[in-house]
Image: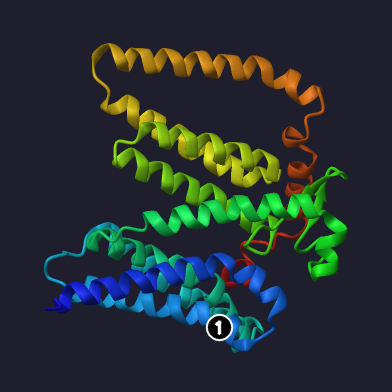
């Protein structure tokens, strides 16, 4: 006899599996399929998942609304109101809708994440499949080369591009090099935590090494910084819960690594290592300052 609640949970888990894998390959799929159905399907699915998460959190008495959740929802509503005020600055409803699609909808997925954690859904398998797919597709594209990828329909400087004139940046299954690197960093971190929670420390170390290796090869520095910051935060959390002599050992190791990095950084930068080149960073700051509107202007207040 089929247990209905268990069946519903299984169907929902399969739906989540499909959703997470679909949004992973959507970027590449949209290159070859210029269809409104392909472009809207992921947004409709995400909007529905965010909606049912909000309904569950609001009406489920077993999950009291905490201040953190109220702050998240309140922030989303505030951003929406400010976005609507931008209509007074000459923007159209189309622009407002697109802004909601690319900002509020992904931010609303935070609520969806709270729902998944509360329901204890296991996304380990789909994360592992996405992780392997990301690396495999990137390696295949690296072997094909730029000319072959452009013949297939990828566009130079959009889907593929160069870093420092020679290192090829590739999109993997995601569609853009930046998207690939950030997804690799986030999925790698989630898999690492998942293995640690299952007390599989060796597998967690393997995932960490693979992730940081392919992040360096991607040459997307912002994604690499995200990964490193998360590792530092996790390390200091480990120090916090450590006992006695291990706590002092962790502190000593962190101070040693900090001193080593500080001493080697000038030499690494002077050696011309591309990932530590600061030209791009300063160039962006200059551009932001040139085009940043005054905070007292209408553009500065409502966008």
Q: Residue at x 62, y 52 (%)?
A: 136
Q: Residue at x 23, y 63 (%)?
A: 119
Judging by the rendered image, the residue that carries numbered circle 1 is: 40
User: Badge 1, how many Cα within 10 Å: few under 14, some, many 20+?
Assistant: few
As drawn, which residue projects farthest toward the front? 1
Q: Residue at x 55, y 83 (%)?
A: 40
Snapshot quadrant of residue 59:
bottom left
Closer to us: 116 or 51: 116
Position of residue 234 measured from the top left corner of the image (x, y, whole percent): 40, 35
Q: Is residue 294 left or right of residue 14?
A: right
Q: How many marks?
A: 1
Q: In this picture, is 114 found above or below 281?
A: below
Position of residue 115 measured from the top left corner of the image (x, y, whole percent): 28, 65
Quarter of the picture holding the C terminus: bottom right
Q: In this picture, is 170 found above or below 58?
A: above
Residue 87 visible, this angle: yes
Q: In this picture, is 5 found above or below 124?
A: below
Q: In this picture, is 209 found above or below 280?
A: above
Q: Residue at x 30, y 63 (%)?
A: 116
Closer to us: 203 or 47: 203
Q: Is residue 240 left or right of residue 85?
A: left
Display coloring: rainbow
Quarter of the picture holding the N terminus: bottom left
Position of residue 93 measured from the top left corner of the image (x, y, whole percent): 59, 88
Secondary element at tag 1 = helix
Residue 156 visible, this angle: no
Closer to us: 53 or 121: 121
């Amino acid at each position: 006899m089929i247990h209905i609640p268990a069946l519903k949970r299984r169907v929902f888990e399969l739906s989540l599996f499909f959703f997470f894998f679909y949004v992973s390959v959507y970027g590449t799929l949209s290159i070859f399929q210029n269809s409104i159905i392909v472009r809207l399907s992921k947004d409709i699915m995400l909007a529905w998942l965010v909606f049912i998460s909000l309904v569950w959190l609001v009406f489920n008495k077993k999950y009291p609304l905490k201040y953190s959740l109220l702050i998240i929802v309140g922030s989303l509503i505030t951003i929406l109101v400010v976005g609507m005020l931008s209509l007074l600055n000459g923007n159209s409803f189309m622009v407002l809708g697109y802004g909601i699609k690319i900002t509020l909808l992904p931010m609303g997925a935070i609520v969806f994440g709270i729902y998944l954690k509360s329901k204890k859904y296991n996304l380990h398998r789909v994360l592992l499949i996405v992780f392997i797919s990301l690396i495999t597709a990137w390696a295949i594209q690296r072997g094909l080369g730029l000319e072959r990828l452009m013949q297939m329909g990828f566009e130079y400087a959009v889907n593929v591009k160069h870093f420092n004139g020679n290192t090829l940046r590739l999109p993997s299954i995601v569609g853009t090099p930046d998207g690939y690197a950030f997804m690799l960093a986030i999925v790698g971190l989630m898999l690492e935590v998942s293995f640690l929670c299952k007390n599989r420390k060796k597998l967690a170390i393997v995932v960490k090494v693979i992730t940081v290796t392919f992040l360096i090869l991607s040459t997307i520095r912002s994604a690499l910084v995200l990964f490193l910051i998360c590792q530092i935060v996790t390390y200091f959390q480990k120090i916090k819960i450590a006992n006695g002599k291990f706590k002092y050992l962790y502190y000593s190791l962190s101070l040693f690594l900090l001193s080593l990095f500080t001493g080697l950084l000038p030499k690494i930068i002077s050696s011309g290592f591309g990932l530590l080149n600061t030209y791009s960073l300063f160039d962006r700051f200059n551009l932001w300052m040139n085009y940043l509107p005054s905070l007292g202007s209408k553009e500065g207040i409502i966008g």
